[in-house]
Image: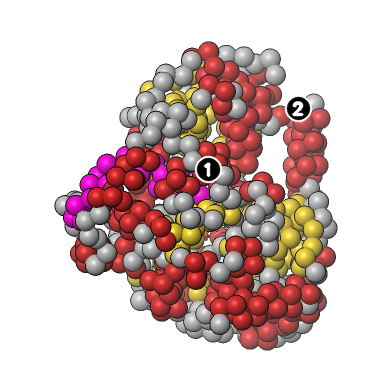
Amino acid sequence: MAADRHQAGLKILEKLTTDAYQIQEQVLEDILNRNAGTEYLRGFLNGQCDKQHFKKNVPIVTYDDIEPYIHRIANGESSDILLAEPVTGFYRSTGTSGGQPKLIPSTAEKDKGALFQTLMGSVMNKHFGDLDKAGKSMQLLFTKPEIETPSGLLATTATTSIFKDSGFRNIVSMRYTSPIETIFCSDINQSMYCQLLVGLIQRDKVVSVGSIFASAMVRAIKFIEDHWEELCYNIKTGHLSSWISDSGCKNALSLIMKPNPDLADSIENICGCKSWEGIIRKLWPKAKYIGAVATGVMSQYTAALDFYSGGLPLVSSAYVCSEAMCGINLEPLSKPADVSYTFLSNMAYFEFLPVKKDCLTMFLDQVQFNSVARQESKEMMSSIEAIEPVDLVNVEPGQCYELVVTTSAGLYRYKVGDILMATGFYNNAPQFQFVERQNVILSIDAEKTSEVDLLRAVTKAKALLDPLGFLLTGYTSYADTSSTPGHYILFWELKMKESNDMKEPDPKIMVECCFSMEESLNYTYRMYRKENIIAPLELRVVKQGTFDALMDYYVSQGASMSQYKGPSCIKSKQAIKILDSRVMGKFFSVETQF
Ligand code: AMP
């Protein structure tokens, strides 16, 4: 049965990739036929619904452009102002607009999600065999409570809505170690504790471990480091700790727990070791892989997971956003840095805006930094924006693009905000590496540092600490403009590879790390530093557990634990306070000879 399903999945994949052009044309035709009469599209199309009219007249937009329509629907107007099909709710994406999560309309349509899951399952089955038959997956999954909009429509994260669906509820006990009650527990610490406890109790059945994004997996390991003695005590006695007060968790665990001193002893022996290198493989010896997206901004967690994994492959299986499900990774065994996602032609109508990123960086690096150059770079930016988008099948390998989607749920030529690089084709469907979330996160004066610029700088600087046995387990940043000139502050959480006791890092090396980061930042940054328009970069080393506290704070403020990506930059005063109250040492760059 399962084998037939997976074979059928692979066949569908062949068709979707071979007929990518025809399917994309059909997807657009269907969307336009259904929605050309909506208030939004009428204004641009005047009743014409062919592709030429669409391309010529419908503007490429960002969330801010369509937000008024979304708010009108959320406030009770009929959804046909934007799309013909009724809006049944909203997804709250991790992308924000004015500090608020974006609301992406969703409809009753479930087929695409189900098909996407089936195709991913078929690819995994091809590489790892029938794991459903072999055992269970310890997937750490979290949900967020729904929020009611004034119209009565509910807004929740895309992952929560998947877990709420009966399709997921029907398979959860068969496929996953976590009982549904633990996934729906609103207290993330109780949820994490219980999911890890059942994952450890069933460790001999666990054939894969993971979370949606790599950040939650790293958090889970740190959580075990803090709680393993208590977890073992619960396993030994068969009694759940009294601080677990959630009735759903208590009931679910009461059906699973019974005293098991032998199991507790084995886990105690593993966790009691000085080094936690390879701990995942030791705790779950039958696991074949760690499933967690580790591309894009999540690549900061690969070093930690490589250390803990004991050589298990780290699989980033899909590229999905609240706006659309986009692509799957056909080579799950490839290293995170080499992962490409093959776009599925039936999920949305995809367009790609060429981005001459390298060209722009080179340009800014080469020109003398003066007002003429600034003007030229601005003009160059606007000429980049004037470039026409290309269709899915027409992208060119090696070229970077900004993703633009048109969906059946009311997004028309909508910029998702991600930059992707085309790497090749599978049949006629292009494959893309995730490059970056297109957002400037740090800025002082005209200097602009993107998420990927910062990640590159941190990666280079932390290499200085590798030989000394330190692991960087979390970082974030903010632009401090409270004094003039302003400066960038980086927060780093470190841990020793071989022990849980933290050694003071050598101040000389930390100062070198500061300089190394500055050296890696862009031309404008370095220029501004020389001219003292930006003051020396500051590195604040925080105590262990600080980034868990930060995650707790964001989750308490409405972020989803499952979709949490760890901010590369923070603006919230409260979040900065949490970090500042845990600083162990401050270091500044002293050089400007780049
Ligand atoms: P959300 O809107 O909360 O669902 O988050 C979607 C965003 O997460 C995307 O726009 C990407 O920026 C990021 N993302 C999703 N999947 C991946 C992936 N496989 N690799 C890197 N980033 C991803």
Residue interval drawn in magenta: 214-239
Residue 156 position, x and y percent, is 41, 66
Q: Residue at x 63, y 41 (%)?
A: 452
Label 1 close to label 2 by CB (< 8 Å): no
Report the front residue among 32 and 272: 272
Disc 1 residue crowd, few under 14, some 14–19, many 20+, Cα 10 Å: some
Residue farthest toward the front in the current orientation of the protein: 262
Disc 2 residue crowd, few under 14, some 14–19, many 20+, Cα 10 Å: some
Image mark for residue 310? 1
Q: Secondary structure at mark 1?
A: loop
Q: Quadrant of ligand 1?
A: bottom right
Report the front residue among 317 and 108: 317
Q: How is the image coloured?
A: secondary structure
Q: Residue at x 43, y 32 (%)?
A: 275
Say which quarter of the image contains residue 88: bottom left
Horizontal arrangement in the rendering, residue 119 relative to residue 16 (left or right): left
The vertical placement of 524 against 309, above or below, is above
Amino acid tagged 1: Gly
Report the front residue among 149 and 154: 154
Residue 330 position, x and y percent, is 68, 62
Q: Kindly identify which residue carries mark 2.
A: 369
Residue 215 position, x and y percent, is 48, 47
On whether residue 499 falls in the magenta region, the answer is no
Report the front residue among 408 and 564: 564
Q: Residue at x 54, y 17 (%)?
A: 509
Q: Mostly what secondary structure, the magenta segment?
A: helix
Horizontal arrangement in the rendering, residue 141 relative to residue 361 (left or right): left
Quarter of the image containing the C terminus?
top right
**Residue 469 makes an appearance in the image:** yes
Q: Residue at x 64, y 67 (%)?
A: 126
Image mark for residue 408? none
